[in-house]
């Protein structure tokens, strides 16, 4: 079976499984949403309305006061102070309607970073406010920040994969094929790297990194350093797989015709480990998503005012916000959905590529 037919077969089997199919659809929607975040978000990531801190989600109406079907509209919230409960409350100001505009003009942005545009999926009339998921303590639109924050939370893990997996594959392939003294030395080095506690290393890095770095540069550097540590465990598995196949006939045939060690490792041995690599990559992405979220939640990752799902969730840790402002929990729900979807797809791919699973 050729590589293209094998990939097509894997994709068909993933689609055939209803759980992995739903997971694939959810991930596709999430990545499309963050790709078109500028167009889908009603406001830019710099938008802030300090007079509407912790405003609840806007209510969209399609029926007017006469009971007739109407063009979608909303009302602004008006802030009141409740002296009895000593807190700020919001009530709809029904004195003026603000109609929604689809594909209307709004704040300017650059699509893909260089195409000037000002069209948004949905906007509201001037002086109106549209907060689909409410606002945070600084009056920033939670829905818009979720879209922009997802760009970091859902993509920064791939940076680590592009570093750790090629390095781990090559290191493990060389160690397993050469064997002997070289294998012993290389494995002792990888074991020493694996013994470094990554959590405490992160805390140290967060303390010593330059203060003038942007939060994205700061966390990208942390992820790169973590990737340079995380490849060690992966290389040990690749090394074990190479040890089990290096004495097979196709490897001996390559040696007999004078193929170099480099060619044997890259062209013959490492491709035999791709089944494990694909599964490991799929199951590693959730761990990086959780790492970013956890670090940003603790204040060691992405810093305000830049958005990520982790630092957005930090605001929901107060029980008052959980009780009265549940929309602040939306980033946590999306983290759960994304991680679960990746795990479901990874488990399905593992079952497809595992010969023993096929026999069962």
Image: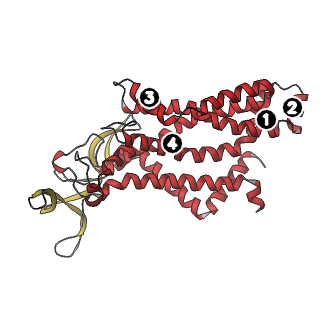
x and y percentages locating residue 6 in the rendered image? 72, 50
Q: Name the residue under label 1.
A: 268
Q: Which of marks 3 and 4 is nearer the N terminus?
A: 3
Residue furthest bottom in the image = 67
Residue 219, located in which quarter of the rendered image? top left
State if disc 2 and disc 1 touch (CB < 8 Å).
yes
Tell us which disc is closer to us: 3 or 4. Answer: 3
Look at the numbered disc 2 and give the secondary structure of its residue: helix
Q: Around disc 3, counting alpha carbons within 10 Å, would you say few (fewer than 14), some (14 to 19), or many (20 or more)?
A: some
Tell us which disc is closer to us: 4 or 2. Answer: 4
Q: In this view, does 230 lie above or below 23?
A: above
Q: Around disc 2, counting alpha carbons within 10 Å, would you say few (fewer than 14), some (14 to 19), or many (20 or more)?
A: some
Q: Residue 254 carries which label?
A: 2
Residue 294, located in which quarter of the rendered image? top left
Q: Around disc 1, counting alpha carbons within 10 Å, would you say few (fewer than 14), some (14 to 19), or many (20 or more)?
A: some
Q: 26 or 191, which is in the foreground?
A: 191
State if disc 2 and disc 3 touch (CB < 8 Å).
no
Separation of marks 1 and 2 at Cα, in angstroms: 8 Å
Separation of marks 4 and 2 at Cα, in angstroms: 38 Å
Q: Name the residue under label 4.
A: 288
x and y percentages locating residue 242 in the rendered image? 77, 37
Q: In this view, does 50 lie to the left or right of 116?
A: left
State if disc 4 and disc 3 touch (CB < 8 Å).
no
Residue at position x 64%, y 63% in the image = 16
Q: Is residue 86 left or right of residue 228?
A: left
Q: Name the residue under label 3.
A: 205
């Amino acid at each position: 079976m050729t590589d293209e037919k094998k990939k097509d077969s894997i994709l068909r089997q993933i689609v055939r499984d209803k759980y992995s199919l739903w997971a694939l659809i959810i991930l596709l929607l999430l990545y499309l949403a963050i790709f078109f975040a500028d167009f889908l978000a009603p406001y830019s990531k710099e938008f802030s309305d300090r007079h509407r801190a912790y405003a609840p989600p806007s209510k969209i109406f399609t029926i007017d006061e006469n009971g007739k079907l109407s063009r979608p509209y909303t009302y602004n919230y008006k802030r009141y102070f409740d002296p009895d409960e000593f807190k700020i409350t919001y009530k709809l100001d029904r004195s003026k309607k603000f109609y929604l505009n689809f594909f209307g003009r709004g704040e300017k942005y650059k699509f893909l970073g260089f195409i000037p545009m000002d069209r948004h999926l949905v906007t509201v009339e001037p002086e109106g406010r549209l907060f689909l998921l409410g606002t945070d303590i600084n009056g920033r639109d939670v829905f818009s920040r979720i879209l922009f924050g997802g760009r970091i939370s859902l993509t920064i893990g791939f940076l680590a994969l592009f570093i750790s997996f090629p390095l781990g594959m090559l290191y493990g392939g060389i160690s397993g094929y050469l064997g002997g003294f070289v294998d012993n030395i290389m494995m002792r080095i990888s074991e020493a790297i694996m013994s470094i506690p990554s959590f405490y290393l992160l805390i140290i890095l967060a303390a010593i990194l330059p203060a003038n770095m942007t939060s994205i540069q700061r966390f990208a550097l942390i992820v790169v350093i973590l990737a340079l540590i995380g490849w060690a465990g992966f290389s040990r598995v690749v090394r074990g797989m190479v040890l089990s196949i290096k004495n097979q006939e196709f490897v001996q045939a390559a040696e007999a015709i004078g193929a170099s060690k480099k060619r044997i490792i890259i062209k013959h041995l490492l491709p035999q480990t791709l089944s494990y690599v694909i599964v490991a990559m799929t199951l590693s992405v959730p761990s990086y998503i959780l790492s970013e979220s956890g670090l940003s939640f603790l204040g060691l990752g992405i810093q305000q005012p830049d958005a990520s799902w982790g630092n957005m969730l930090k605001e929901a840790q107060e029980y008052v916000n959980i009780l009265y402002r549940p929309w602040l929990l939306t980033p946590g729900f999306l983290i759960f959905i994304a991680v679960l979807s990746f795990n479901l797809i990874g488990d399905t791919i593992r079952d497809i590529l595992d010969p023993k699973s096929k026999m069962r």
